Amino acid sequence: MASPLLSLAGIGLHRGGRPVLQDVSLTLNAGEILTVIGPNGAGKTSLVRIALGLMAPDSGHRQVKPGLRIGYMPQQLGLNESLPLNVRRFLTLARPGVAPALLAQSLQEVGAAHVIDTPVTRLSGGELQRVLLARALLREPELLVLDEPAQGVDITGQEELYNLIAAVRARRGCGVLMVSHDLHLVMAATDHVLCLNRHVCCEGHPESVSAHPEYLRLFGAQGGRGLAIYSHHHDHRHDAHGEVCNHEHH
């Protein structure tokens, strides 16, 4: 059996005397899409930085496949509105010396070939996310790390983007670590879900749309049509600050 692309075991992180991550573990294999969900402040961004090797945890360890090629799609991109930078130049800066054919291929793959000469600051939200995905693909990654890939995209665009990510995975056979704070649409495009609130609350495989009682206890009534959920066992509750306040098993 092939070794995992990425393995995080017992990850712990503290900042200012407060826990950011507590005993978080995950394993991601080639060809698998794993989505980390959780509310704001759950530690998702810190987990991504540790997964990328940009931050060292206080405890636990990170292991990656030797020579692993990672493509990263950031949550936000801050560009000066007055910067005269078109998409072609933007992608060339991301990977100097990239062959024009590979650059064009990456844009074609994400359905954004038509914006190659468009200023980056004039792209729509959906176009920008596709260009950022194309930039990540320029590294010909074995692992894609996507931090809130549908941010700034409308509902229709989100569905298209998640379908595109699933198609890229199928075509390239890469692993995908995806992060989201919401559950809309993303669940239908993932193989495994990990719910994070500084620690792993629950994890499992996505299922069809359902009024699962555990799902409702975690996320209230925000679920709806077009939403797939996952089965899990949740053995505790959180107070308003996210602290565990009940350790009774159910």
Image (spheres, rainbow, N blue to C red):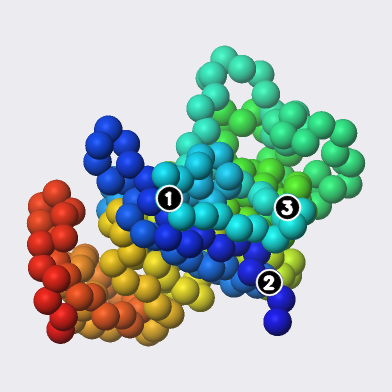
Q: Which circle's residue, 2 or 3, is located before the other in the chain?
A: 2
| Separation (CA) of disc 2 from disc 3 | 15 Å
The picture places residue 59, in percent across and down from the top left corner, at 43, 50
Q: Residue at x 74, y 57 (%)?
A: 66
Element on which disc 2 rests: loop
Q: Residue at x 14, y 49 (%)?
A: 241
| Separation (CA) of disc 2 from disc 1 | 22 Å
Which residue matches tag 1?
59
Q: Quadrant of the N terminus?
A: bottom right
Element on which disc 1 rests: strand
At label 1, the amino acid type is Ser
Which residue matches tag 2?
3
What number of labels is visible?
A: 3
Which residue matches tag 3?
69
Q: Residue at x 34, y 51 (%)?
A: 21
Q: Residue 238 falls in which quadrant of the image? A: bottom left
At label 3, the amino acid type is Arg
Q: Residue 30 falls in which quadrant of the image? A: bottom right
The residue most toward the front is 59
Q: Residues within 10 Å of mark 1 (few under 14, many from 20)?
A: some
Q: Which circle's residue, 3 or 1, is located before the other in the chain?
A: 1
The picture places residue 152, in percent across and down from the top left corner, at 43, 44
